[in-house]
Amino acid sequence: MPSVVGLLEQHELAARRRVDGLREEADRIQAELAAAEQEWLEWTIARERVGAVLSGPGGDSADAVAAERPGGAGTEAEASPLVAAKAKSQVPVWREGLARTALSADYQRILAVLADRVRLGQGPLTCQEMASAFGMDVVPAKVEALRSKAKRLVARGWLAEPAPGRFTLARGVSGSDGGS
């Protein structure tokens, strides 16, 4: 008859193996989730770009395509600032002439503080420094919310992340309106 300690050790070993197996499965699912999120992001960007082309000047897709080509028709489109495909609901992909006003107020605040840093010749900011600059409590929830917004701006071309966790304006994004 096995001892009580021996039985406990067997149960502990079985539980440890189950935990290890579940951790491996969780890691696999996490990697699969990250890949699926990246694919979703790429399809979202593609849909936004198609929407921008199709909703070009005059609503005619042929005119929109011609306006996007170098030397094509579209001088009226070049004179007026471009707007987001869905105003304020998403972060549009940055492109030449797209005004900062295409972004929601939170994103505009992030760009404004980073534009001031660039104008003053100062380096990139961390999300903790941004939270402090906005007068927010520097607590993990607020910092992570800012980090999420900053990462979204990086993914859409508005910001650059020259070092992990440090953000600055992307090349070409400058001036008070966010255009170049």
Image (spheres, rainbow, N blue to C red):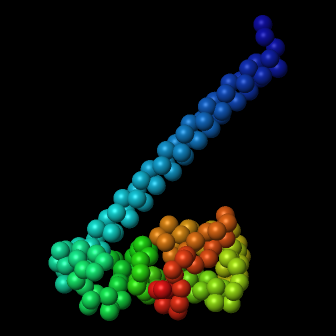
The N terminus appears in which quarter of the rendering?
Answer: top right
46 in relation to 146, above or below = above
Please name the residue shown 23% across and 77% down the image.
Answer: 66
Quarter of the image holding residue 162?
Answer: bottom right
In this orientation, which residue lies closer to the viewer: 41 or 20?
Answer: 41
Please name the residue shown 48% across and 49% down the image.
Answer: 35
Instruction: Find residue 133 and report its horizontal and vertical position in percent.
Output: 68, 85
* Count of numbered badges drawn on the protein: 0
**Left or right of residue 8: residue 143:** left
Please name the residue shown 35% across and 84% down the image.
Answer: 83
Instruction: Find residue 137 and report its horizontal and vertical position in percent.
Output: 70, 79
136 in relation to 164, above or below = below
**Left or right of residue 171: residue 73:** left
Instruction: Find residue 73 and report its horizontal and vertical position in percent.
Output: 22, 83
Q: Is residue 109 visible?
A: no
Q: Residue furthest front?
A: 71
Q: Is residue 122 visible?
A: yes
In this orientation, which residue lies closer to the viewer: 51 or 160?
Answer: 160
Quarter of the image holding residue 10?
Answer: top right
Quarter of the image holding residue 90?
Answer: bottom left
